[in-house]
Image: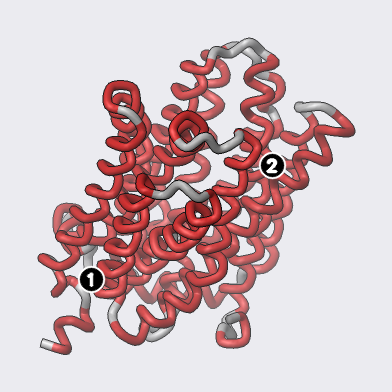
Amino acid sequence: MLRRITDRNVRVIYLAMLLVSTAYGVAVAVLALHLTAHHIPKLAMGGLASAFALGLMVCSGVAGWLVARVGPKPVLAGALLGYAVCVACFPLWSTLPALTVARFFDGASSAFIWVAAETALLAVADRTHKGLIMSGYAVAFALGYVLGPLIASAVVHVSGTSAPFLVSGALGLAASAVVARGLDGALQSAHGALHADGAPSPLAVVLWRIKTSCAGAFAYGYFQASVVLFLPLYLIESKGVPERHTLFVTAFFAAGMLGLTTVIARYGDRHGHLRVMAALGLIGALMVGGFVGLSSFPLMCAAVFVAGAALASISPLSLALQGLIAAPRDLGRANALYNAAYAVGILLGPPVSGALFGARGGVVMLLHLAALWLVFVAAAVVFALDDPRAQRRL
């Protein structure tokens, strides 16, 4: 894939995202242990996750506004530095209010990081490779989340639960330095050229243009936040899977995404992003709905692998699609709306899924997630002409 990408700025952003996603993975891997050591109840831990999503949702709009005015490079470098400081100071906070504020600013920093990085990549990507370039962005993040827990386990073994947050801060600082030193003036020039063509569109117009991308982001945020919390419980309680084996489920989901998302993105670049997203949503819905009928653990892992390849690939395709349908001058705000939709999904998914799990059981919870993806597929079919390729075919 990297052989096809000749722009140095893209490679620099990939490296920065790999570093910061590894930092995320290190911090997330020890977060529950750190909170337990400070006697934070499990219900409050869920509230801390909501604080992160709230910070992401609230600050996405500000991030889009700021990127449009000063360009992605200073915003990205500054946000990475802010994340590094925030996560490195995390061990200093032990009370629930302080931890809630810390998680809010963690989400706020992430909003600025994601919006700036996505806007920069879409600004330099040509129309025929947007899916490929955004798939590289997704792969960099996925690799970091694989490497992070491995680093965290080694550091915890030697130095306890506070040291990994310092390691995470160091990785964030390194990512900020990579952006500050590595991104060249061509990126800012490209960004300036995008905004030289007239006034920005009204926000409602931007949202309507990218509605199918935002729908995919919402569905994936809702689904991801729900299954991370409740799928292991369903496997243990209803399927009799040993607790230690549930770790393999996450690994197979990530493996599906890492193995196939680049191939799927190239297919989307050729044949239409929204058309491919609808097919992926249907495959994912069938995997999630069919999961309830599986009794063999290897078959469950295979279903999770296919679901990971299908559903996790929707995110880079969504970004590539909105890079084509949003006016160039509106890219910053479009990415802000996209990330806000993702954050709303993270906020709503766990409480609704948890309520269904508690009242009706894991089968109903999984079926409602499958239904969510079918609704997305229906929206993609109804609004198929959002995709420029579909308009050309017509």
- Quarter occupied by the N terminus: bottom right
Residue 233: x %, y % from top left: 48, 31
Q: Is residue 133 left or right of residue 87?
A: left
**Quadrant of residue 96 in the image?**
top right
Residue in the foreground of this view, choosing between 316 and 263: 263
Image quadrant holding the C terminus, namely bottom left
Q: Position of residue 70 (x, y in %)?
A: 45, 57
Judged by depth in the image, the label closer to the viewer, 2 or 1, is 2
Q: Residue at x 30, y 73 (%)?
A: 276
Asked whether residue 176 appears in the rendered view, the answer is no
Identify which residue is drawn at 26% across, 53% down.
373
Q: Secondary structure at mark 2?
A: helix
Tag of residue 26: 2
Q: Earlier in the sequence, mark 2 or mark 1?
A: 2
Q: Is residue 41 above or below residue 82?
A: above
Q: Amino acid at mark 1?
A: Gly
Crowding around mark 1 (Cα neighbors within 10 Å: few <14, some 14 to 19, many 20+) is few
Instruction: Name the residue carrying label 1.
Output: 198
Q: Secondary structure at mark 1?
A: loop
In the image, is 384 to the left or to the right of 151? left
Q: Nearer the viewer, residue 286 or 33?
A: 286
Per the model, the C-alpha gap separating discs 2 and 1 is 43 Å
Q: Give the residue drawn at x 47%, y 57%.
A: 116
- Going by the numbered disc 2, the residue's amino acid type is Val
Q: Is residue 230 left or right of residue 24?
A: left
161 sits to left or right of 243: right
Where is residue 77 drawn, in percent x and y?
A: 60, 54
Q: Looking at this view, name the residue that lies furthest to the right.
A: 158
